[in-house]
Image (cartoon, rainbow, N blue to C red):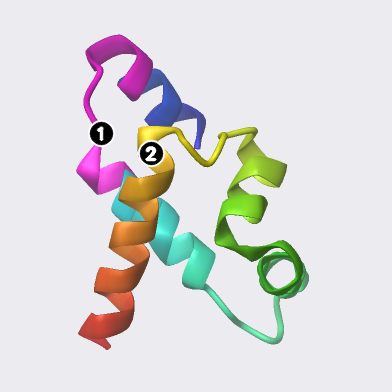
Amino acid sequence: MKPAKQYYELFKEVPTGLTKGIAALLLFDYKEDPEAIELQETIKKVGMEGALFQYSQLEKEHPLVAAIQKQVEWLKESK
C-alpha cells in the first residue's frame, strides 16, 4: 500500500497497476493462509473501506480507495 500512497502523493495520479494488485490482495481468500483468513474476516466485519483504513490509514475519501474499489469490481466481473 505504501508505494501506491507515495506514488499518489508524488504525482497526484492513481497508480493503476498498484491499485489492481491491492484489489487482488483484498480478494485473496485461501483457507490455508491465516493472514488471508484474517483479512477476509476484517472485510466482512468493517467492509472494504474499513479494512483499507485499518491496514493503511486511507480515509474513505482518498482517491486510492475509489480506484481500488473499482479494480475489485472489475476483477470480480472478470472471473
**Mark 2: amino acid:** Leu
Give me the disc on residue 64: 2
Query: Badge 1: few (under 14), some or many (20 or more) residues near its Cα, within 10 Å?
Result: some
| Picture layout, residue 14 above or below residue 7 | below
Distance (Cα) linking label 2 and label 1: 6 Å
**Residue 18 point in image, percent of width and height:** 32, 43
Q: Earlier in the sequence, mark 2 or mark 1?
A: 1
Foreground of the two, 79 or 45: 45
Q: Is residue 30 magenta?
A: no
Q: Which residue is mark 1?
A: 14
Estimate the x, y position of residue 58 in percent, counting from the top left. 56, 34
- Residue sitting at x 57%, y 60%: 48
Neighbour tally class for label 2: few under 14, some 14-19, many 20 plus, Cα within 10 Å: many
Q: Quadrant of residue 51?
A: bottom right
Residue 36, above or below 52: below
- Look at the image and give the residue range highlighted in magenta: 8-18
Q: How many labels, in total?
A: 2
Above or below: residue 37 compared with residue 26 = below
Residue 4 position by quadrant: top left
Q: Main secondary structure of the magenta part?
A: helix
Picture residue at 71% right of the left edge, 44% below the top: 54
Q: Residue at x 41, y 65 (%)?
A: 24
* Residue 59 drawn at (x, y percent): 57, 34
